[in-house]
Amino acid sequence: MAERLRPIIVIKKIKKHEGHHGGQWKVAYADFITALMAFFLLLWLLAMVSPEKRVALSQYFTDYSVFKEQGEKVTKGGVGILEFKGGGRQAGNAQGKMEAMSPEKLKTKIKAAVEANLKTLKDQVLVDVHEGTVRIQIVDNEGSQMFLLGSAKQECR
């Protein structure tokens, strides 16, 4: 028997290597360079701050705790709000002396300003004295929103 010999066919596939290996390294490099720029910017800004301010800032972040202190204690003493007495303002300079305002007096001033300027919302701004500080609460009444949903614009009434 004569066998028929089939010719052997060899297919040679040549892979072409393109010049790039993907773009992930570019993203990682850009992130690294951005972080490096932010770091050097921070160093430059810290070098521009006076030593007294740097010490005060450092002291603030080492001593301050949200759980221990409230607003008036952050201002070192927090006796009250300072108010100008007498004189007026000329050429940007404050004239007259400054006196501390009690929390009760500040509460009445804020309430009067809310009554005068926010007549339609006066029921939604609550001002009271709590533990020696003035607390201002802005609330939505049921069925009466202060702002349009998803917006910073005041709701029209």
Image (cartoon, rainbow, N blue to C red):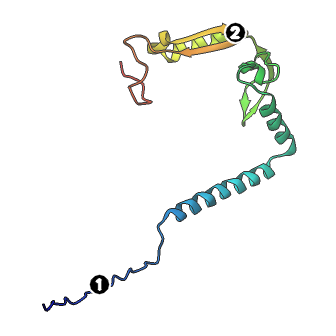
Residue 21 picture location, percent across and down = 48, 71
Label 2 SS = helix
Q: Mark 1 and mark 2: span between their CA atoms?
A: 95 Å
Task: Pick the residue in front: 39 or 25.
Answer: 25
Q: Residue at x 44, y 14 (%)?
A: 120
Residue 6 picture location, percent across and down = 19, 88
Residue 147 picture location, percent across and down = 42, 23
Which mark, by number, is residue 105?
2
Measured along the vertical axis of the image, is residue 102 above or below residue 30? above
Dot 1 and dot 2 residues touching (CB under 8 Å): no
Asked where in the image residue 3 lies, by quadrant, the reply is bottom left
Sequence order check, earlier mark of 1 and 2 = 1
Tell me the crowding category of disc 2: few under 14, some 14 to 19, or many 20 or more residues within 10 angstroms, Cα based.
few
Tell me the crowding category of disc 1: few under 14, some 14 to 19, or many 20 or more residues within 10 angstroms, Cα based.
few
Residue 155 picture location, percent across and down = 39, 22
- Kindly identify the amino acid type of the residue bearing the numbered disc 1: Ile
What quarter of the picture does the N terminus occupy? bottom left
Task: Pick the residue in front: 70 or 23.
Answer: 23
Q: Which residue is mark 1?
A: 11
Extreme left residue here? 1
- Kindly identify the amino acid type of the residue bearing the numbered disc 2: Lys
Task: Pick the residue in front: 62 or 153.
Answer: 62
Measured along the vertical axis of the image, is residue 148 above or below residue 56? above
Asked where in the image residue 10 lies, by quadrant, the reply is bottom left
Q: Residue at x 82, y 40 (%)?
A: 53
Relative horizontal placement of residue 142, taking residue 126 as reference (left or right): left
Question: How many numbered marks are there?
Answer: 2
